[in-house]
Amino acid sequence: MRTTKDIIVRLLTNLETEDEKLLQILLVGQPELDDKLDSVNLRQLKQRIALRSHLLPLDSNETKGYILRRLQLAGCTYPSALFPPETIAAVRLKPAPSLPPADARRRCWP
């Protein structure tokens, strides 16, 4: 049995002209969303997805760049003084050799 949500998604994704779709839906989520989309119940939705992608974890240089850029955007004039290399290294302390951006954000800005 189809739910109201299923019907709405179907109606919205069917909006198109002869040449193109009129509406594009962007799904953004955690890795669990990818698992959920693989379920049998969402087979029809999965068939309508044109592109699936995921972010790879950040390496140490990318983590440093991410943190310093966020500080600059927040108005910090000297981000390296606020987050020196040893602090950035401490942010990366975990068993895995890389760090997802969301983890870096949570560790710096709880």
Image (tube, rainbow, N blue to C red):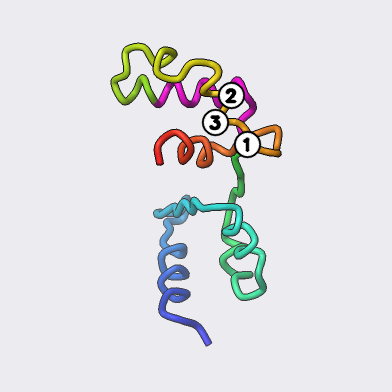
Q: Main secondary structure of the magenta part?
A: helix
Mark 1–mark 2 CB contact (< 8 Å): no
Q: Measuring from the top left, give residue 9's x and y in whole percent.
A: 45, 68
Q: Measuring from the top left, give residue 74's x and y in whole percent.
A: 31, 25
Please tell me whether residue 55 is drawn above or below residue 73 in the rendered image.
below
The residue that disc 2 covers is: 89
Disc 1 residue type? Pro
How busy is the neighbourhood of tag 3: few (under 14 within 10 Å), some, or many (20 plus)?
many
CA gap, disc 3 and disc 1: 14 Å
Q: Nearer the viewer, mark 3 or mark 1?
A: 3
- Total labels: the figure holds 3
Q: Residue drawn at (66%, 73%), measured in percent from left and top?
A: 40
Q: Measuring from the top left, give residue 23's x and y in whole percent.
A: 41, 54
Disc 2 residue type? Ala
Q: Earlier in the sequence, mark 1 or mark 2?
A: 1
Q: Measuring from the top left, give residue 65's x and y in whole percent.
A: 51, 20
Task: Give the left or right position of residue 37, taking residue 15 as reference.
Answer: right
The residue that disc 3 covers is: 91
Q: Residue drawn at (40%, 72%), measured in percent from left and top?
A: 8
CA gap, disc 1 and disc 2: 15 Å
Mark 3–mark 2 CB contact (< 8 Å): yes
Q: Which residues are magenta?
A: 56-70
How busy is the neighbourhood of tag 1: few (under 14 within 10 Å), some, or many (20 plus)?
some
Q: Nearer the viewer, mark 1 or mark 2?
A: 2
SS for dot 2: helix
Q: Earlier in the sequence, mark 3 or mark 1?
A: 1
SS for dot 3: helix
The residue that disc 1 covers is: 57
